[in-house]
Image: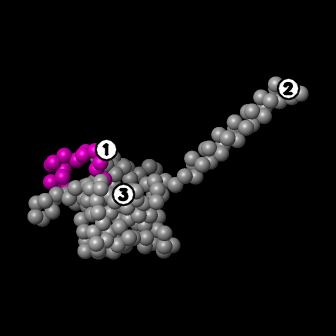
Amino acid sequence: MVSQRILNVWLAVALVLAATAGLGWWLSRPDASAWARDDGIEGAGQVSQQRGGDDCEGLVLLDVSPAAALAVSGTFVRDTGGVLGEEELQRHFARPNGSLRRYGPEASLPEDAIETPWTRGDGAALWLAPDGDDYAYVAGDRVEAWPRADGLVCAEPAAG
């Protein structure tokens, strides 16, 4: 017959192993905000995603460097909560004709949109339009249109 002490040790070992396996899974899961090229080409631009800093809390910013894809560059903004007021929208998202670029949570890809080699940790893909469209399209479970911001500077400071 197994003593209570041995049974408790085995139970403790089993709990530690289960917790470690769960921790290992949690640590190895993909970062849903990390973008990477899936074509293996190094040094060809950069795409990064970060939360807005204190001035833009609640926003998600997508920075696309000029060489990343189709020579499209800029900061594209996901504003799901309507953080930006009318003044900020007018200042940073106005088109020459006076209309505003706005975040589109349920967008359609334009016919000329091209899938870039950039994918995010959650499986989403970055699509851009070759005509210099004012949007980056993030296609995952649905397509979102993130408008390009003109002069919006509100990224979280880099840790360091």
Q: Position of residue 75 (x, y in %)?
A: 30, 60
Query: Is residue 102 depicted above or below 4 in this figure?
Result: below
Q: Secondary structure at mark 1?
A: loop
The boundaries of the magenta stretch are: 78-92
Query: Is residue 90 depicted above or below 114 in this figure?
Result: above
Looking at the rendered structure, the kind of residue marked 3 is Arg
Closer to the camera: disc 2 or disc 1? 2
Q: Which residue is mark 1?
A: 57
Q: Which residue is mark 2?
A: 3
Of the 4 image quadrants, the one containing the N terminus is: top right
Q: Given the current orientation, which residue lies at the most extreme left position? A: 97
Residue 84 in magenta stretch: yes
Q: Secondary structure at mark 3?
A: loop
Q: Earlier in the sequence, mark 2 or mark 1?
A: 2
109 vs 37, nearest the viewer: 109
Q: Which mark is residue 142?
A: 3
Residue 34 in magenta stretch: no
Q: Secondary structure at mark 2?
A: loop
Distance, label 2 to label 1, CA atoms, is 57 Å
Image point (46%, 50%), residue name = 160
Image point (10%, 64%), residue name = 97
